[in-house]
Amino acid sequence: MNTLKNKSNKKTLIVTREDRRMVRKMINDMGKSLIRDGFVKVEGKTPYELSEEIWKHLLSKETPMYITLDHTNDLLKAAQSYEKEGKLEFACLLYTLWFEHWLNSILASVFRRRKFTAKLITQIIRDIDISRGKTTWLLQLLEMPPFKNDHLIKINKIIELRNSFVHYKWQPFDIDKNERKAEYEAALFEVAKTISYFKAPSVTIMMRQEEPII
């Protein structure tokens, strides 16, 4: 019988290899979260010392644990699928959602390290507009790295097209020229490199202003 033991000698039944894989991933993700949110400092510690400190927090009742349902990968796959199918409006909608989820996750992590309450974090993320606040003055206020202007232009174009679709700001177009479709195709082509840039782990670490996880 396979069990997971912790320092309090409590045992939890782990039935299959998949269970063990999921437990390892869960513990790994929680450890990364503790580092991201500032509960565990990486600098000057050996891997063993880091592991010991992470377990100390995981077993402590005083360390808050946050669970987040991360839909970013699913959103990105769905957006890419819609783009391949030629459903460009839906692709823009989901690419924008992906970017919002990615940025909100980073902001929430920065706020938690600064000891903001969960209620305040939710209010800030909900109330501040993405294109007129979260990607501009809020980053400056938090002393976070600014977005490169070319990436910001490409993201804002996708957001603009998303808003036109979501809020039914339909514009008439010449059915023979179909310039609207060309506009979507050009914007989606340009934003692909920007999304690859944002997905890079080094960019996420830079934006969160966190210590690299060894």
Image (tube, rainbow, N blue to C red):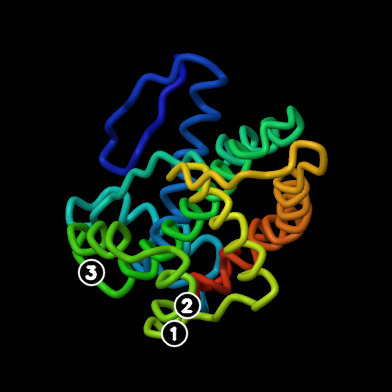
Give residue 136's mark: 2
Tag in front: 3 or 2: 2
- Measured in 3D between alpha carbons, the distance from the residue under mark 2 to the one under mark 1, in whole angstroms, is 7 Å
Is residue 197 shown above or below 58? Answer: below
Label 2 crowd (10 A; few <14 / some 14-19 / many >=20): some
Judged left or right of residue 12, residue 160 is right
Q: Residue 178 vs residue 119: left or right?
A: right
Quadrant of image for the N terminus: top left
Q: Position of residue 93 (x, y in %)?
A: 54, 43
Alpha carbon of mark 3 to alpha carbon of mark 2: how far?
20 Å
Q: Provide residue 75's location: percent of width, then percent of height.
A: 56, 38
Check disc 1: other Cα within 10 Å, few if <14, some if 14-19, many if 20+: few
Residue beneath label 3, please?
A: 116
Q: Position of residue 68 (x, y in %)?
A: 37, 44
Horizontal and vertical percent for residue 130?
43, 63
Q: Nearer the viewer, residue 87 or 45?
A: 87
Q: Amino acid at mark 2?
A: Thr
Q: Residue at x 55, y 57 (%)?
A: 160
Looking at the rendering, which quadrant does residue 91 occupy?
top right
What's the amino acid at mark 1?
Gln
> How many residues crowd around disc 3 within 10 Å: few (fewer than 14), some, or many (20 or more)?
some
Tell me the element at label 1. Answer: helix
**Residue type, label 3:** Phe
Q: Can you tell which mark lies on residue 123?
A: none
| Residue 140's disc number | 1
Q: What residue appears at the point 52 percent right and 49 percent down from the top-left corner?
A: 164
Q: Nearer the viewer, residue 201 or 171?
A: 171
